[in-house]
Amino acid sequence: MPELHVASGKVREIYSVDDDRLLLVASDRISTFDVVLPTEIPDKGRVLTGLSGFWFARTEQIVPNHLLALREDGRSTECRLLEMLPIECVVRGYITGSGWKDYLANGAVCGHRLPEGLRESDKLPEPIFTPSTKAQTGHDENITRDQAAELVGRERFDEVELVAIALYRFASEHAEARGIILADTKFEFGLDENGTLVLADEAFTPDSSRFWPVDEYEPGHGQPSFDKQFVRDYCETLGWDKTYPGPELPHEVVAGTRARYVEAFERLTGISFDDYLADPEVVLR
Ligand code: PZK
């Protein structure tokens, strides 16, 4: 049963298993400032795969998901082949990134009017759903609720918004109690053969979410990223222009970054990463 390669993301690959199954493989590649670096972070793909599996298992009561099995290698997920919705489903609990830019320019994000006087990285009164387009190249662009509803249909839009906010509330509450703020997160949804909404892709990983350490949280400026800060700080010391090719990372930066990924995994799951490596399906129990 040779799996056929069907697509590459910056740091992941998709293979087709059979008519109704895909294999998602998370590599150890890391990107910063939108550039994939030549140096890998050992086990990064396993951390992300394990975290997604953990969250899929714990959010089944909110929405069904595409996960069928985690493979022994710890980095490969067998999943159901779905018809994907053409929008990125972003939920923001804090005002940062493109949301902060839009707020400064318009006082609103994707049509959500926000209170005056917010500082960068402030917590929002309520989490907001801020869909974006799926850009083939370059950055996803924020769209209004009406534009998103045009792309997926009004009823489906209402369902996706409700589910996405419920997922965010569930995971961010769990994470904050364990010392990690999930500032925002991006979901991808698909439909199964019955037209049922299914959570796909990855869920609440540091590549799909902003993780901030609770102890260092300080509104009024951008926050250090839980996982990539060593890499960004190192890159800033080089005077690199942030175009390809990116710099090789020294071994201390690699080791420090790997330790941060493993720390995020262990804090969020309460499971030792060695136990995950011995048997990846521990995260599903
Ligand atoms: C699907 N992507 C994004 C992820 C890449 C690209 N269950 C599914 N059914 C159908 N399609 C997808 C999924 C999922 N998940 C996801 N693109 C298609 C993506 C990883 C690597 F190159």
Image: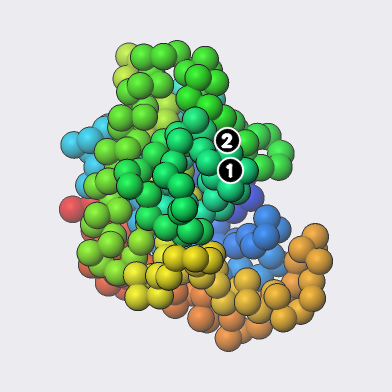
Q: Give residue 170's position: percent from left, percent from top.
A: 24, 47
Q: Which residue is mark 2?
A: 142
The residue lying toward the viewer, choosing from 95 and 215, is 95
Question: Residue 35 appears in which quarter of the rendering?
Answer: bottom right
Furthest-front residue in view?
A: 116
Q: Which mark is nearer the camera, 1 or 2?
A: 1
- Disc on res. 193: none
Residue 1 shows in this picture: no
At horizontal 51% and vertical 81% (from top left) the residue drawn is 256
Residue at the disc numbered 1? 102
Res 155 → quadrant:
top left
Mark 2 crowd level (few <14, some 14–19, many ≥20, 10 Å Cα): many
The answer to whether 28 is drawn above or below residue 162 in the figure is below
- The residue that appears at 32% across and 38% down in the rendered structure is 165
In the foreground, 91 or 121: 121
Above or below, 207 relative to 111: below
| Count of numbered tags | 2
| Horizontal side, residue 20 vs residue 40: left or right | left
